[in-house]
Image (spheres, coloured by chain):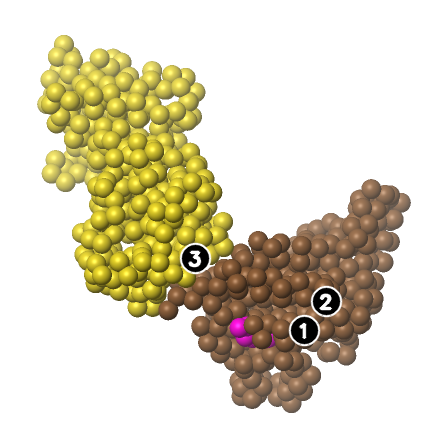
């Protein structure tokens, strides 16, 4: 099997499975909120997991909240910030290439009477900074961006955006979706200076069901889930040690492997860019994109057809568009990047992890040749 | 004590002459088959009506109007049924009729709070009953007016009609849901439907089934050009059609190699026509094996390039069986309406690639001539293709 769909989800690594197993079968199954010894053991281990996560992200322990997923983190951050800071206004800035968990939240904000300003992105997937300057003013309460786009791999020019904010609207908060950048780029929350950020476990060889929300010390956010006041009142509900520990281990393992993985995946990416371009493919990901994501269009193969062709060889990738004769739906991200429909309807996303190898990349290219031989259809 | 029963009325079947018995027997058999999942039922015919009663007192489908809805819809989907009502059945004299009518109206108004006017209609099969029909109407109407001061009588355009029937037992009911009419499936010979994932073909199957025709279906699958989801969608559509047409065999033909062969060896502007000719021949072979006497397609004149009269003439000539095209003169909007009505539309518009789309030329020939098709099929071994379609990788699913 060749798994090139790591932006969708990843296989949990052995270390993660081990820690979950230990926490479920050992002496740490107590409620971290209990006053007895059993609870205290669990609480201690939980605090350790939290602290490990914080140290991976260079932030304080009390700036992190465990959530169920990236989507919950995004919803809590955006709604919670606006609810807690009504005086900062009702204007939000974002782009059309955000993940659905942000875009759908924006739709809801519009229904609630907020003014959502979308700034356009260029062919390189990056937001137009001049446009940002022109729409940013002191009415803006919040800006929502994605560190690395999940479809194109495009990296946000965060420093420039921070500078623009400093110049024009220092009071506007910034929420950053770091789901795809976690474990792949260095994330130092202290120096980045964003106000809120979201993370997910299952994209870094952790498991589904756990995410993190970062809220910078001093930033006010209303909780989404009310109850027993766990996690500093920010997310009630009994804390899950196995999930928290799995997140911490996944982050630590990713951090350990990061430099090597980046190098290997860069080689894979460069190799595939070169070989696939020779073979009737067009690369949609910008040249300076994160190497872990490679968006590419195969001429004469609609996205879904290529996905199924590869599936026959036990190779797994994603389509970024769902095509049909009735409603031609192509990727809204590629559309926003101004990529022609004839290309976006043939586009697929390859996404890599530290476990992928050059051998797999070579084998992938061989299979692409076979697929072109056997299945290429170009009806004129 | 009163119980709830279901009353179904027959339509066209009752107009049959000497054949009537056969049609009725078929209809009763179809009802029993369709309703087999609703617990032990007694289904019988009396005076041109069909009565459906629970054999077990606690059958949940007879508890009230809401619980009966699913069962009534199932009855209404059996071809031959014109309308269906939920009735209250009880014994006794005019006082019992009054009190049951009151209970019924009370419940009816809870479900239809806007209803303000009514009238009573009565049928008296039991001629020994001391009051005649007009007298019963007058009595029951008066009783209802007395007990529901907000209601008025309107004999011309009432919000609801309260029906009272006096037979071996007494019945009251109001309202009915429309049946799908038609003739009982099984009274005509079986047909083979060419089923795709679109809007038209399920409607075509439904329409032929409504004339009494049992249906088998054939689908042409082109993995990897069409996905497993596309196949599942067709299976789901077949299930929807089979709610009306009864048990069905779905033949799934592995069409990939055949299609690739066509793309390589025939001109692209004739591809759709060549493809349809091969599909029809494969369908005919399968139809012969399955004891079907016709093919059914969802074609509608002029809808797409392969559905012009010239194209239809050229595809028609490769098979001997009659090809029935119930949608040929139908407007797309009308087809969509039927599709919605039978609950197929939402499934039909799911966005999975179906094999017709990837292999369609940008400018297909709309007025093909004989010489065109001879040229187009010159380099193809059509006979081998048909054989391959019928024999290699054929999957049969019973629905």
Q: Quadrant of the image for the N terminus of chain B?
A: top left
Q: Which mark is residue B88?
A: none
Give the CA separation, mark 3 to mark 2. Answer: 33 Å
The residue identified by callout 3 is B260
Which quarter shows the C terminus of chain B?
top left
Q: Residue at x 30, y 51 (%)?
A: B277
Residue located 46% across and 76% down the image: A340
Note whether residue B339 is visible.
Answer: no
Labels 3, 1: front one: 3
- Tell me where the magenta segment starts and ends, as one range: A280-285
In the picture of the structure, the residue carrying the numbered disc 1 is: A271
Chain letter for brown, please.
A
**Image location (x, y in percent) of residue A222:** 65, 64
Which corner quadrant of the image does residue A378 belong to? Answer: bottom left
Q: Which mark is residue A358?
A: 2
- How far across and down, in percent of the image, does residue A173 sit? 64, 77
- Which residue is at the far top? B128
Q: Residue furthest right?
A: A37
Looking at this view, is A370 or B207 the one in front? A370
Asked if labels 1 and 2 touch by Cβ distance under 8 angstroms, the answer is: yes
On what subunit does the disc labeled 3 rest?
B
SS class, disc 2: helix
Alpha carbon of mark 3 to alpha carbon of mark 1: how far? Answer: 31 Å
Vertical comparison of B313 with A183: above or below: above
Q: Is residue B299 visible?
A: yes
Magenta stretch holds residue A163: no
Pick whichever, B91 or B351, lies toward us. Answer: B351
Residue nearer the viewer, A309 or A353: A309
Please, which chain is the residue tagged with disc 1 on? A
Q: Colour of chain B?
A: yellow
């Amino acid at each position: 099997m060749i798994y090139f769909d790591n932006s969708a989800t990843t296989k949990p690594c052995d270390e993660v499975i081990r820690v979950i197993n230990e926490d479920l079968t050992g002496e740490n199954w107590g409620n971290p909120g209990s006053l007895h010894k059993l609870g205290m053991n669990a609480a201690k281990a939980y605090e350790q997991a939290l602290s490990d996560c914080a140290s991976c992200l260079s932030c304080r322990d009390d700036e992190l909240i465990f959530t169920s997923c990236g989507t919950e983190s995004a919803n809590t951050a955006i709604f919670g910030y606006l609810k807690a800071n009504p005086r900062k206004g009702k204007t939000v800035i974002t782009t059309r290439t955000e993940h659905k968990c942000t875009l759908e939240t924006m739709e809801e904000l519009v229904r609630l009477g907020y003014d959502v300003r979308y700034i356009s992105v260029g062919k390189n997937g990056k937001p137009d900074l001049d446009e940002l300057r022109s729409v940013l003013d002191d009415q803006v309460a919040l800006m929502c961006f994605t560190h690395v786009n999940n479809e194109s791999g495009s990296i946000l020019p965060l420093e420039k955006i921070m500078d623009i904010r400093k110049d024009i609207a220092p009071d506007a908060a910034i929420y950053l979706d770091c789901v795809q950048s976690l474990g792949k780029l260095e994330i130092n929350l202290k120096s980045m200076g964003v106000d809120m950020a979201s993370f997910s476990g299952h994209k870094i060889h952790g498991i589904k069901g756990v995410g993190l929300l970062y809220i910078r010390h001093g930033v006010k956010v209303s909780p989404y889930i009310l109850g027993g006041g766990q996690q500093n009142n920010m997310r009630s509900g009994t804390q899950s040690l196995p999930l928290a520990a799995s997140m911490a281990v996944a982050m630590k393992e990713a951090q350990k492997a990061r430099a090597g993985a980046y190098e290997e995946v860069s080689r894979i990416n460069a190799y595939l860019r070169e070989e696939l371009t020779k073979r009737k493919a067009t690369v949609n990901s910008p040249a300076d994109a994160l190497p872990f994501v490679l968006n590419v269009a195969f001429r004469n193969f609609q996205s879904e057809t290529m996905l199924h062709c590869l599936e026959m060889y036990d190779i797994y990738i994603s389509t970024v568009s769902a095509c049909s004769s009735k409603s031609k739906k192509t990727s809204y991200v590629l559309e926003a990047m101004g990529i022609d429909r004839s290309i976006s309807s043939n586009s697929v996303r390859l996404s890599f992890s530290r476990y992928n190898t050059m051998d797999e990349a070579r084998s992938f290219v061989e299979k692409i040749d076979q697929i072109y031989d056997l299945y290429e259809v170009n009806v004129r | 004590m009163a119980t709830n029963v279901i009353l179904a009325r027959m339509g066209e079947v009752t107009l049959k002459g000497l054949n009537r018995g056969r049609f009725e027997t078929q209809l009763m058999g179809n009802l029993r088959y369709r309703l087999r999942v609703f617990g032990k039922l007694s289904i019988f015919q009396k005076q041109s009506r069909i009565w459906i009663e629970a054999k077990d007192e606690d059958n949940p489908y007879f508890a009230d109007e809401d619980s009966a809805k699913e069962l009534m819809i199932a009855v209404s989907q059996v071809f031959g049924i014109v309308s269906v009502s939920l009735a209250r059945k009880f014994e006794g004299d005019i006082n019992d009729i009054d009190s049951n009518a009151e209970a019924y109206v009370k419940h009816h108004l809870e479900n239809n709070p806007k209803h303000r006017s009514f009238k009573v209609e009565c049928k008296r099969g039991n001629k020994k009953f001391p009051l005649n029909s007009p007298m019963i109407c007058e009595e029951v109407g008066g009783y209802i007016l007395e007990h529901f001061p907000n209601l008025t009588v309107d004999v011309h355009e009432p919000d609801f009609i309260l029906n009272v029937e006096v037979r071996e037992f007494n019945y009251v009911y109001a309202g009915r849901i429309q049946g799908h009419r038609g003739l009982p499936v099984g009274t005509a010979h079986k047909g083979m439907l060419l089923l795709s994932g679109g809007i038209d073909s399920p409607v075509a199957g439904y329409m032929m089934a409504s004339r009494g025709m049992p249906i088998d279906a054939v689908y042409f699958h082109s993995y990897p050009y069409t996905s497993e989801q596309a196949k599942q969608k067709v299976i789901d559509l077949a299930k929807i059609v089979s709610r009306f047409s009864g048990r069905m065999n779905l033949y799934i033909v592995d069409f990939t190699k055949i299609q690739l062969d066509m793309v390589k060896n025939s001109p692209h502007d004739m591809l759709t026509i060549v493809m349809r000719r091969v599909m029809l021949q494969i369908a005919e072979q399968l139809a012969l094996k399955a004891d079907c006497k016709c093919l059914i397609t969802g074609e509608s004149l002029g809808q797409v390039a392969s559905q012009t009269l010239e194209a239809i003439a050229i595809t028609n000539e490769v098979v001997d069986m009659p090809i029935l095209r119930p949608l040929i003169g139908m407007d797309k909007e009308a087809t969509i309406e039927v599709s919605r009505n039978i609950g197929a539309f939402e499934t039909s518009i799911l966005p999975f690639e179906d094999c017709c789309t990837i292999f369609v030329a940008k400018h297909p020939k709309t007025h093909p001539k004989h010489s065109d098709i001879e040229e187009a099929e010159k380099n193809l071994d059509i006979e081998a293709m048909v054989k391959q379609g019928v024999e290699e990788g054929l999957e049969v699913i019973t629905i």
